[in-house]
Image (cartoon, grey):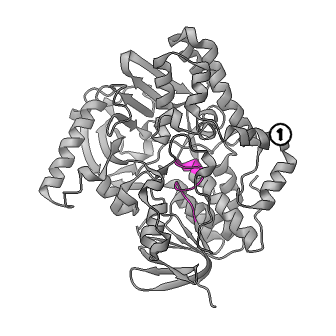
Amino acid sequence: MAYSADIIVVGTGIAGLTAASLLQERGFSTLAFEKNSYPGGSCASFRHQGYTFDTGASVFYGFSEDDKSGTLNLHTRIFNRLGVRVPTIPDPVQIHYHLPNGFEVPVFYEKEKFLGALVRRFPHEAAGIRAFYQELEAVYEILSALPAGSLEDFVHVMQVGVRNPGKTMALAVKTFKSMGKTARKYIKDDELLKFIDIESYSWAVQDAVSTPLVNAGICLADRHHGGINYPVGGAGAIPAALCEGIKKFGGAVEFGCDVEEILLRNGRAEGVRLTTGETFTAKAVISNATVWDTFNRLVKDSRYNVPENKFLRAPSWFQLYLGVDAGVVPEGFHVHHIVVDDWERYNNIGGTVYFSAPSVLDPLVAPEGKHVVHAFVTDEMHRWSGYKRGDRAYKQAKEDFGTLVIRRVEKILPGLSDALEVKVFATPLTHQRYLNRYQGSYGPLLYPGQNILQKPQNRTALKGLYIVGDSTFPGQGVIAVTYSGISCASYIARKLGNPLDYLS
């Protein structure tokens, strides 16, 4: 058969681009299709009236230049491998939390500064605080010592196990532990345990009891090692650099190409068909769509359907992209904030406000004398399903809800309403339209008590079809989906006879 490419990638989210770039650098031909005119999916940027807005992700790990720190420094190592550069600006605070009862705490890069702030608030829990965060540190130390690769690759697993028997066994034990249950071994104060919950909810959209300890060890320890770094020019710099790497080694990324179907023959994926009717063939197909979109929309054989209730479905988002007069943002204002008005509602739809002002770090994303403000809350498709794009009622509903969120943000930015110069609102309908995500969802989550290894890996029931992204191990977040892309590339490369070298 004459193949269009060795590997076809459906969607240019960070996971798909990561897999394609590493496989292309290794000598395999790759062809990625993207329905939009830009790459990145939830980790992208768009320009509007002189402002650069991040579509979703804005907290980035994995960019440390120190070879001995960071969650394997995955971004740095990948871009070094590809020979491309993504300049970043270090952020001294991961998130500044604004919580009920006047509880405020910035999570500083300096670990002792952060822990000291918690101890001052909860002096009676000083020992428990240090013991719990040391548990996260122990997970991080194990993960940072092990090379990234596929858990489905027997050779990789054996090599890692033989070379690091103690760490491998310790990590296996920790995969059965919950972040919240571990916290409760050391901490009793109810308000402090709520803070541990919001630490988890900030990226996992689940409370700490429902969040695997291994996930927490990556995100909540690495912020004090590799730290948080913002790419110059916005989130879109990351997918743009991955596309540059793919093209540098001869691969192709095609925009404005919407995949209608993953083509099957005798239980094997052999290519894709676009909405234009064009077909392309490959030895392997990688889907960057959610597990529901992959098997309930792109794969037409109903025998492979995935019920929604196989996983917990994370909510979608209502997002506000705001251009504001710089005078409303005070000197020394931190970039990322989370606002919780009521502990009883923090994990309800819209209960927590996420907020960032990346122009505090990178003035280039806003016109001179202006700032970018990005605020968002969880939302659900059913609240918007009765509206149609462009209708006056839809525009008014967005305006009304956006105004409510802005008022809540004014808790930390007084006068924001009067400083607005640009407003763009996005609902779950927007997420579904641009990202092709089922219900506009943030993706599938594990049920409480499930082991993190029960998250789908890259292989599927169909030969030649692989999945990457937040539907797969280890889950949500840019650094997590980056890992899934590395894992997938590693498995495919070995299967096709030219294994990847470990990233270094």
- Name the spot of residue 90 as percent of width and height, x first: 57, 37
**In the image, what residue occupies the spot 43% across and 80% down?**
274
Question: Which quadrant would residue 327 be assigned to in this image?
Answer: top left
Percent coordinates x, y for residue 218 in the rendering: 63, 39
On screen, residue 234 versus residue 141, left or right, reads left
Q: Which quadrant of the view contains residue 141? A: top right
* Rendered view: 237 above or below 119: below
Residue 95: in sight, yes or no?
no
Image coordinates of residue 149 in percent, x first then y, are 72, 56
Q: Residues within 10 Å of mark 1 (few under 14, many from 20)?
A: few
Secondary structure category for the residue under label 1: helix
Q: Which residue lies furthest to the right in this view?
A: 162
Question: Mark 1 = which residue?
Answer: 166
Residue occupying the point 49% across, 61% down: 291
Residue 228's spot in the image, x, y percent?
57, 38
Q: Is residue 121 visible?
A: yes
Total marks in image? 1
Which region of the structure is painted magenta?
A: 467-480
470 magenta-colored: yes
Q: In this view, does 283 lie to the left or right of 303?
A: right
Magenta stretch, main secondary structure class: loop
Task: Please give the name of the residue rendered at 47% of the width and 44% of the height, measured from the top-left corner.
Answer: 58
Q: Is residue 168 left or right of residue 315?
A: right
Q: Does the magenta stretch include residue 390?
A: no
Q: Name which residue type carries label 1.
A: Gly
Which quarter of the rendering shows the N terminus?
A: bottom right
Q: Residue at (41%, 68%) from the top-left corner? A: 37
